[in-house]
Image (cartoon, rainbow, N blue to C red):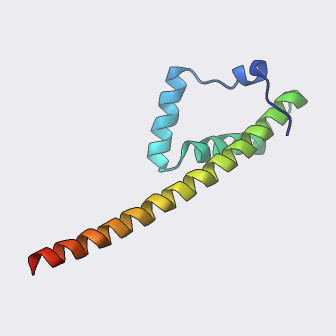
Amino acid sequence: MKKIDGETLQHFRLDNNQVGKVQKEVKKYNMTKAEFYRMVVSDYFKNETVANLTPEYIDTLKQLIEILNVIGERQKRIERSVNYCEDHLRIFFDEYDGEEEN
């Protein structure tokens, strides 16, 4: 995978207003930021609005999608691990509370 240079990446930086909008949408649809960005970029490709982009921009977008896919998968695994731990802690404390009552 070709490394994304700082100049190209600068075009993809969000200002504070855009960051706020992303956070609202992420909460609204109950998804990770990676899933949201992937959806936006995917939609961008589907609407064929990439016709006037240079090949470098298209390559960069594809790289960003790959990166977001990896991040999204890691977030899902972390979330599953947290849920697993919470379930076991709940079971442990339920059993512990039960022993205390006897």
Which residue extends farthest bottom?
Answer: 102
Q: Residue at x 69, y 26 (%)?
A: 12
What number of labels is visible? 0
Q: Position of residue 85 (x, y in %)?
A: 41, 63
Q: Nearer the viewer, residue 63 or 57?
A: 63
Q: Position of residue 17 (x, y in %)?
A: 50, 22
* Vertical position of residue 7 compared to residue 28: above or below: above
Q: Position of residue 95 (x, y in %)?
A: 24, 76
* Vertical position of residue 3 compared to residue 85: above or below: above
Question: Which quadrant holds the N terminus?
Answer: top right
Q: Residue at x 13, y 74 (%)?
A: 100
Is any part of residue 50 visible from this angle? no
Q: Nearer the viewer, residue 30 or 2?
A: 2
Q: Residue at x 77, y 18 (%)?
A: 7
Question: Which quadrant holds the C terminus?
Answer: bottom left
Is any part of residue 24 visible from this angle? yes
Which residue extends farthest left?
Answer: 102
* Vertical position of residue 85 compared to residue 20: above or below: below
Q: Residue 55 sits in which quadrant?
A: top right
Q: Nearer the viewer, residue 41 or 75?
A: 75
Q: Residue at x 76, y 45 (%)?
A: 46
Q: Residue 51 sits in which quadrant?
A: top right
Q: Position of residue 40 (x, y in %)?
A: 65, 41
**In screen coordinates, is 1 left or right of 19?**
right
**In screen coordinates, is 46 left or right of 84?**
right
